[in-house]
Amino acid sequence: MNEKMYGQNIHLPSLDNLFSSESDRQDAKLEKVQNLQLSELFPFKDHPFQIRDDEEMEKMVDSIKDHGVLTPAIVRPRPEGGYELVSGHRRHRGCTLAGLDTMPCIVREMDDDRRKRFSR
């Protein structure tokens, strides 16, 4: 007996696709600034720059207290959880010294080679 399987090739769109525009779907793919917990941000291994608690850092802390962080850090997800700082180590230290709990960051997927090139 040859029974036909009706509806076998029907693929219904998700509710998100039904009730969002193409512009909304494209916007969802863009990188966005997120406020991440400082406790979730970790320096990458062999970071080439030194972070000093000197007069320049004091100026940065004062600026962060007055204006916030104007340029978000760049981070990438860590397999073990949290995020690895790619750029923004001084801003991270400044936020810590300013007594903040969060810092604006852009989360970006990147492999080790791209991270090394980016942080030079």
Image (cartoon, rainbow, N blue to C red):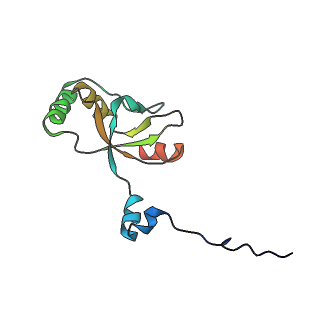
Q: Is residue 76 left or right of residue 89?
A: right
Given residues 103 and 74, the one toward you in this image is 103
Given residues 62 and 21, the one toward you in this image is 21
Q: Is residue 34 left or right of residue 43?
A: left
Residue 39 image point, x, y percent: 37, 28
Residue 44 image point, x, y percent: 45, 33
Image quadrant assignment for residue 9: bottom right
Q: Quadrant of the C terminus?
A: top left
**Residue found at the far left of this picture:** 66
**Residue 6 visible in the snapshot:** yes
Q: Is residue 112 above or below residue 94?
A: below
**Residue found at the far right of this picture:** 1
Q: How many marks?
A: 0
Q: Is residue 53 above or below residue 84?
A: above
Give the residue displayed 49% in from the left and 47% down from the top: 110
Give the residue displayed 31% in from the left and 32% down from the top: 92
Give the residue displayed 29% in from the left and 25% down from the top: 52
Image quadrant assignment for residue 27: bottom left
Given residues 90 and 32, the one toward you in this image is 32
Given residues 57 and 29, the one toward you in this image is 29
**Residue 120 visible in the snapshot:** no
Residue 71 image point, x, y percent: 26, 45
Q: Quadrant of the N terminus?
A: bottom right
